[in-house]
Image (cartoon, grey):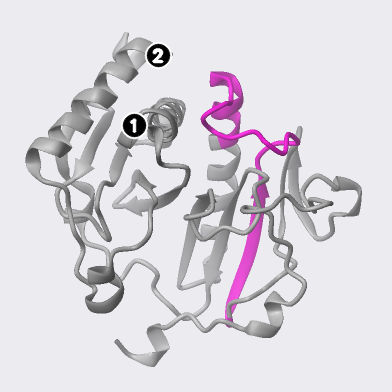
Amino acid sequence: MDEKDLLIFQLDGAKGKPRDTKKKAAVCPFCDTDNLTNIIKQKDDMIWLENKFRTLKDTYQTVLIESSEHDADISTYSVKKNSEVFQFIFECWNSLLETKKYKSVLMYKNFGPMSGGSLRHPHFQVVGLNNVDGYQYISKHNFTGYKIWKSDNIDFNISQEPIMGFVEFNIRIKDAKYLNDLAEFARITVRYILNEFHNGTCDSYNIFFYDEDGDIICKIVPRFVASPYFVGYKLPQRDNKDTLEKFASDVLVKLKNEAECDEIK
């Protein structure tokens, strides 16, 4: 890996950064909306603003506050609210992409103490990388695998070749007009991860977005302690075929029972 492909962390930028994923803070900066600054866009209680704590060199870091409710999450949103969140974050991500100012633009979400996040308040992050291609080590094979649901509009699967492992859910749509369906599949998947996956022992997840030849891909990753094989050797692991097929079957049952989506009616 060339040094120019590395993200450089700036420790000074993290000074004073609030954290409450493990212990609730006295004041949440995302709840204190009257004192938010550098707001880029706002819609109802959703706010897109520049990140006050710019910890990465040669980047443009922004935050998307999803809701005014501190303890809310995709898993607790109504179908309508969740759809509004996904529409809003996609608009913000796309608007930064359209500026053509950055080599790549990443959009992702941290939730829970194992996700790499620092604040509980529901939010996504959109980051423009000036000089680094954030997708250069990602392969199309990272988005294919064991089928959960497939139609003309949506491909929903579990990665056969995960980026890190052990289980990575992929939701692919062919066009942004199917974003509401993607949002609903994501909502049910997150509910499954936090409530049924590994008997409800998972309390953290990440969501990542990708654009591949016009397709929009949402990857949802349950988070536990990172495997030493990945940390030390960049070797991803994957659960065995029977286990992954069991997860796929469980999620499909949950989709059919709970999802409010034209795709599966």
Q: Which residues are magenta?
A: 57-85
State the SS at label 2. Answer: helix
Q: Residue shown at 73%/34% (left/top)?
A: 69
Q: Does 79 lie within the magenta span?
A: yes
**Is any atom of residue 151 visible in this view?**
no
Q: Which residue is most to the left?
A: 241
Residue 247 lies, in percent from the top left, at 22, 32
Q: Residue shown at 56%/58% (left/top)?
A: 117
Q: Which residue is mark 1?
A: 199
Label tally: 2
Residue 92 lies, in percent from the top left, at 60, 49
Q: Does 265 lie within the magenta span?
A: no
Q: Which residue is mark 2?
A: 258
Residue 255 lies, in percent from the top left, at 33, 19
**Quarter of image, res 135:** bottom left
Q: Is residue 146 above or below residue 35?
A: above
Label 1 crowd bin: few (<14), some (14–19), many (20+), radius 10 Å: few
